[in-house]
Amino acid sequence: MTAERITDNLPRILVIDDELAIRRFLHTVLSSEEFFLHEAENGNAGLTAAAAFRPDVILLDLGLPDLDGIEVIKRIREWSQVPIIVLSVRDREDDKVGALDAGADDYLTKPFGVGELLARIRAALRRSLQEIPEPVFTSNDLQVDLGGRRVTVSGADISLTPTEYDILRLLVSNSGKVLTHSQILKQVWGKTYLDQPHVLRVNISNLRRKLECDPSRPQHIITEPGVGYRLK
C-alpha cells in the first residue's frame, strides 16, 4: 500500500499486480495526475482491498501468483460494478474476450502508452460517475438523442434501421468501454445468435457507412481486433 497523501476528493485507483516495477511505475504516473493509489500484490489481497478501499477504478493484472485475474474479476462482480481495466502481457484474443466476458470494462496489453492508459481511466470514471445516462450523447460530429431516437452527423439526420439503432444505443450506453462480439450479439439479437458474428459485422459495416466520414478509417466505432467494438 502506498500513497503520499490522503484526499477524499481524489479518484481512488486500486492496482492489483505482483510486479513491483509495474506498481512503482503506475504510482509515479498516476500520482502525478492527481489520483490516490492503493496497491495489492496478489489476488486475495486485491479482493480484500477492493472491499475496504472502495476504489473508483481497478487496474488488474491477470497473471497473479495466487488467483488468476479472471477469477478476481468474477468475485468482484458478485458484489460490485466498479470499473475494472485489465493490464496484462497476455495478448491472445481468447484472454481478452475471457476477461471482458467475465466483467472487465477494458483491456490494455503491456507495454502500453501512458496517454492511452489515462484516457481509458478517465472514460471509466465518467461511466461510473454517470448514474443516469445523458439523454443526448455527443462525440465530435456525431450526436445521438436517446430520448428522441434521433441520430445526426454534422447536424444532418441519419436514418438507421431498428437493429442498427439498437447496436448504436448499446455502444453509446457503454461509450469508451470495449464490448465483445458475444456481448453485443446477446444484447441485440439474443443467445441464439451467439455463433453468428457475421450478422454483427454486416450491421457494424452499415453503421460506419452512415456515421463515419471515411468508413475505412472509423473515428467513432473502433474495432478491437478479435474481441469486439467500442464507441470512442
Image (cartoon, rainbow, N blue to C red):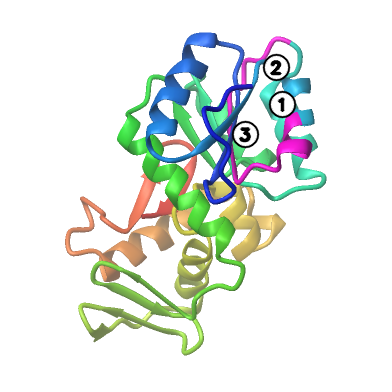
| Residue lying farthest to the left in this orientation | 214
Q: Around disc 2, counting alpha carbons within 10 Å, would you say few (fewer than 14), some (14 to 19), or many (20 or more)?
A: many
Q: Amino acid at mark 3?
A: Ala
Q: Which residues are magenta?
A: 49-65
Answer with left or right where residue 47 lies relative to residue 18. right
User: What residue is disc 2 on?
Assistant: 42
> Cβ–Cβ below 8 Å for labels 1 and 2?
yes
Q: Residue at x 50, y 79 (%)?
A: 162
Q: Amino acid at mark 1?
A: Gly
Give the distance between the C-alpha atoms of the residues marked 1 and 2, in whole angstroms: 6 Å
Q: Around disc 1, counting alpha carbons within 10 Å, would you say few (fewer than 14), some (14 to 19), or many (20 or more)?
A: many
Q: Residue at x 32, y 28 (%)?
A: 113
Question: Total label count?
Answer: 3
Based on the picture, tell me whether residue 214 belongs to the magenta stretch.
Answer: no
User: What residue is disc 1 on?
Assistant: 46
User: What residue is disc 3 on?
Assistant: 99
Residue 191 image-quadrant placement? bottom right
Q: Which of the two discs, 3 and 1, labels the residue nearer the N terminus?
A: 1
